[in-house]
Each structure stands twice: as C-alpha cells, then as structure tokens.
Amino acid sequence: MAQLPTTNPSTFSPNHIEQNLAAVRQTIASTARAANRDSSDIRLIAVSKTMSVSAVEPAVRAGQMEFGENTIQDARTKIPRFEGHGLTWHFIGHLQTNKVKFVPGQFAWVHSIDRFDLAAKLSRHAQRAGKQINGLIQVNVTGESSKHGTTPKDVFALIEQILEAELAGVVLRGLMTLGAYTANESELHDGFAQLRQLRDNCAERFGLKGFTELSMGMTNDYPIAIAEGATLVRVGTAIFGERKK
C-alpha cells in the first residue's frame, strides 16, 4: 500500500478522530443488533466534506475506507492525495451538470441523481472514461423546499425514463434522502420508513435485483435510519467534529 500523505500533525487530533470513529462504529453495531440486523449490511460513509487531508488521514489509518464529499472543487484537492489506498469515494451533494465530467475516475458512487439530464450526462462521461457509476436516486421525502431531490410520486417516472434510455455507465443501486430537520423521532422514523417502502416498490415494479441500497441517516439521526433499514449512513460531525463556517 502507498504511504499516506505527509501532513502537519498540529492541524488535527488523530486520536480524537480515531476514537470518534470507533464510537460511531460501536453505535452502528449496537443499533443493528437492536433492530435484528447484521451490522455488516450497513456501510459507514465518513463525510469528509470541508475537511483537510490532515483530518482524513487518521480515519484512513483507523481502517475507514469509504468517504463522502459534496463539492467537486473540495474533493479534487483531496482524493488524489490518497491514491493507492483503495478508498471508495461517494459524491453526496447536489451535482451541477457542468461538474459531471470530474466524477468518473474519482467517485464510484453518486447519491444525488434527481433528474434525467444529470443521469444522461453521467452516463456519457462514464462511458468516455471507461468507468461505471453506482447511482442513487435522491428523493425529497419531507417535501422541504430547502432540499434537493425528486418527489416520491415522481420516482417511478424518473427511473422508467433512465431505464428506457439504457444509460450505460450508470447502474441504479437504490435511493437516498435527507431526514427531516426536526427533533421529532416519530417523524424521522416515518420518513425513513417511507423511503424503504419506496425502494422496495421500485425494485419490484422494475425488476431491479441490485436496487437494494438506502442512503439515509447522518450524525443526528443515523441510529433511527439504521432501525428503518439504512444500508449506507453518512456521518461527518460525529467523526471529524464541527466544521468551520
């Protein structure tokens, strides 16, 4: 394995990050047990957006292999520094079509497909690069205007359009959502359960055997998401601490 990039140790607390990562993994395991689930079915995406290479490095040393970024500009300064370590990078933010060309070869997953033109452009660039993108349809389950994503009622139509176009280079793997901005646990449970049911309906309607993923749950609500069937949880603050504004 290639050596990790040399960083300034004064810019981060590696022990702090490693301890936080261990705590999150423990929470995932205990929550899975309580929900009668196998914790190995739940993948932790360490959300490294806005974080420096110095912050990512101790997480990699602690065995974290999957990371999430939400801007192309930030990711392009970071991903190349860890080339050769076998990391998997997930794009989890709103993806502008003029940035799509930078995705293949850097990101294996895009969690935020919410319109056909984006899927089509991802397909074109993936094919040119000889890559395959694992795609998740982002759904705005809560209906909040501050969030991106297709509406639940439009998910079938979007998937049908993508499948009919036979977009090589993009494989639909499941759905993604952001939990409600609320402390009401019942509302969070309901929203995540709605996404799970929608995923199951999509898989059955279109005969998609690999349409199994549910990307849902962040620092404030990932245990609830796990209880409702999340397979990918996107956790940042609980690992890296509060981000600089």
Image: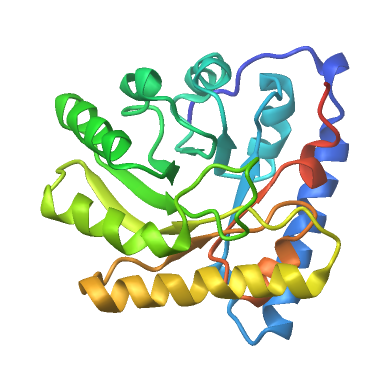
* Residue 156 percent across, percent down from the top left: 31, 63
How is the rendered protein coloured?
rainbow
Number of disc labels: 0
Regarding residue 221, the answer to whether it shows in the image is: yes
Which residue is at the front of the view, 118 or 92?
A: 118
Q: Is residue 74 above or below residue 58?
A: above
Q: Is residue 186 above or below residue 177?
A: below
On the picture, is 182 further left or further right than 163? right
The residue under the point 78% across, 66% down is 27
* Residue 104 percent across, percent down from the top left: 31, 29
The residue under the point 27% across, 35% down is 117
Q: Quadrant of the C terminus?
A: top right
Tell me where residue 232 sits by quadrant: bottom right
The residue under the point 74% across, 75% down is 31
* Residue 170 percent across, percent down from the top left: 25, 44
Tell me where residue 12 sits by quadrant: top right
Which residue is at the front of the view, 11 or 223?
A: 223
Q: Is residue 41 above or below residue 239?
A: below
Q: Residue furthest bottom?
A: 36
The residue under the point 35% across, 42% down is 115
Which residue is at the front of the view, 1 or 114?
A: 114
Regarding residue 29, the answer to whether it shows in the image is: no
